[in-house]
Amino acid sequence: MTLLGSMLKNGIRLTNAVQLRKQNAYKQQRKAFRKLIGKARYTDFGKTYHFDELLGAAEFGTDREFYEKFKQHVPIHDYNRMFDGWWKRALGGERDVTWPGRVKYFALSSGTSEAASKYIPVTKAMQKAIQRTGVRQILTLGRYQNLPSTLYEKGYLMLGGSTDLNVREGHYEGDLSGITASKIPFWFERFYKPGKEIAQERDWALKLDEITEQAADWDIGYVVGVPAWIQLLMEKIIARYQVKTIHDIWPNLMVFCHGGVSFEPYRAGFEKLLAHPITYIETYLASEGFIAYQTHPNAEGMELVLNNGLFFEFIPFTEQNFSSDGDLVANPETLMIDEVEEGKEYALLLSTCSGAWRYLIGDTIKFVNKRRAEIVITGRTKHFLSLCGEHLSVDNMNKAIEMVSDELGISVREFTVAGVTHDTLFAHNWYIGTDDAVDPADLRNRIDQKLKELNDDYAVERRHALKEITVNVLPAATFYRWMESKGKLGGQHKFPRVLKKGLINEWEAFLSVNS
């Protein structure tokens, strides 16, 4: 086994050396575009939007001709437009709708804000693309000099949705994490935990209990999951075996691969569960594809996957392109990878090998290193607060919570913010999930001050239209009970950082019953 680990690590180092010699971002994206268009040109979508012409422009046209034609021929799609016009037919069993063949798998995704599930197609090509990117991410571990070769012989715990997928009218549906876990390569099965039997469990609470009971029998080196659920699981394991840290059960735990939400608000509480530091690797895996991942130690952000079934466009997240509610205006400005600027926020458009085309995924990102195509996620197009021009992003909120948590030595497990009217002006109501003792008034003043330091617009509006800030401190379990009541417990589900419209009333009604 030691020989196996050494061979893997040496192979990883060799692969990393080869990967360093790659084309620039624009050339990679032009090649990815050409492959996608070429593959889909005989679908109904491709015939409708002149993919033959686009392919010719990509192969033989001038540098930007293909992209100008793409913008001219293919409209931007949100989920409703994509589903009602196209994916609904694929869900009904039709072939060659937006991608060649018949789609047999659909990921159920509601993001963090909507009750109704979205049906996102997951084609064979996308399953292979996600696997390839997953392997590439594992290969980057060779760049972390502190990780010994023995890591590659340890168990990989992947905490996700059930692999027992729903069968409906000739197709399978479930969480993307459940779909991908049901398709793991045979060679990976010996390392994969919790194993096929537990992975099929649909009851999230029962799944956590079953993992907890078997945890002492596993030698885990690598954990993958959403921070809130991994932290909750580790706490259950520590309590079950009456030990001080998770390293008393898994002494070889060295890597936590996280995604879905910012890890920083969770860090302080998470690290209390460890006996020694571990390596954190951030990923950006959405229902629409494996978008980016951290590729080297001390990376500023995650590197976009530019050469594996995804074509990216970027819409500047400005008042010229989006309304105050986060709705896209008609004919917004869109850019390719070589046209973006560091430090500016963009909404993502994706065209993928699952048959999404110019699809508004709903996330906002910022480039922190354009040369490496490294990004950070800053929030959602719908999840920001700008009632009166304060332009408060989820990124600002996460940073403020992180800073205040460090100052007070508390662990904030969840939080959400609601923007409401206050007399004739406006207010922000914060709901903070922590099991630590804290003075709400002190917490409120500290969060308010941090946001003023982080966001000039917020500081200005706190002197004018944004008249009140309130903080309600709740047990962390309250947030999990809310998610359970919505049927969103576990897997890839996250609590919304911003409550808008009907969700505010639903949340307040829930609290009045479950206070």
Image: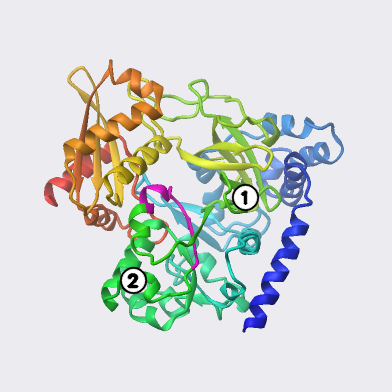
Vertical side of 215 occupied by 439: above or below: above
Mark 1: secondary structure: loop
Q: Which mark is residue 291?
A: none
Q: Is residue 243 left or right of residue 25?
A: left
Q: Is residue 217 above or below residue 328?
A: below
Q: Residue 228 at what x, y percent from top left?
A: 36, 57
Q: Of the residues tagged 2 and 1, which is closer to the observer? A: 2
Extreme residue in the right direction = 60
Q: Is residue 495 above or below residue 255?
A: above
Image quadrant in which you'd find residue 401: top left
* Numbered tag placed on residue 355 in the rendering: 1
| Position in image of residue 420 (x %, y %) | 24, 29
The magenta-colored residue range is 254-267
For label 2, the SS is helix
Is residue 300 highlighted in magenta? no
Dividing the picture into quadrants, the one containing residue 408 is top left
The residue nearer to you, when weighing 498 against 13, is 13
Inspect the magenta stretch and tell me whether residue 262 lies in it: yes
- For the point 35% across and 53% down, the residue is 268
Q: Nearer the viewer, residue 94 or 285?
A: 285
Relative to the observer, which residue lies in front, 300 or 195?
Answer: 300
Residue 486, position in %: x, y?
29, 54
Contact, mark 2 vs mark 1 (Cβ under 8 Å)? no
Name the amino acid, label 2. Leu
Instruction: Please report whichever mark, 2 or 1, sits nearer to the chain's N-terminal start.
Output: 2
* 72 relative to 483, above or below: above
Q: Nearer the viewer, residue 44 or 124?
A: 124
Is residue 111 visible from the viewing direction of this image? Answer: no
Name the residue rendered at 67%, 36% in the picture: 337
Query: Which disc, if any, is residue 208?
Result: 2
Is any part of residue 404 visible from this angle? yes
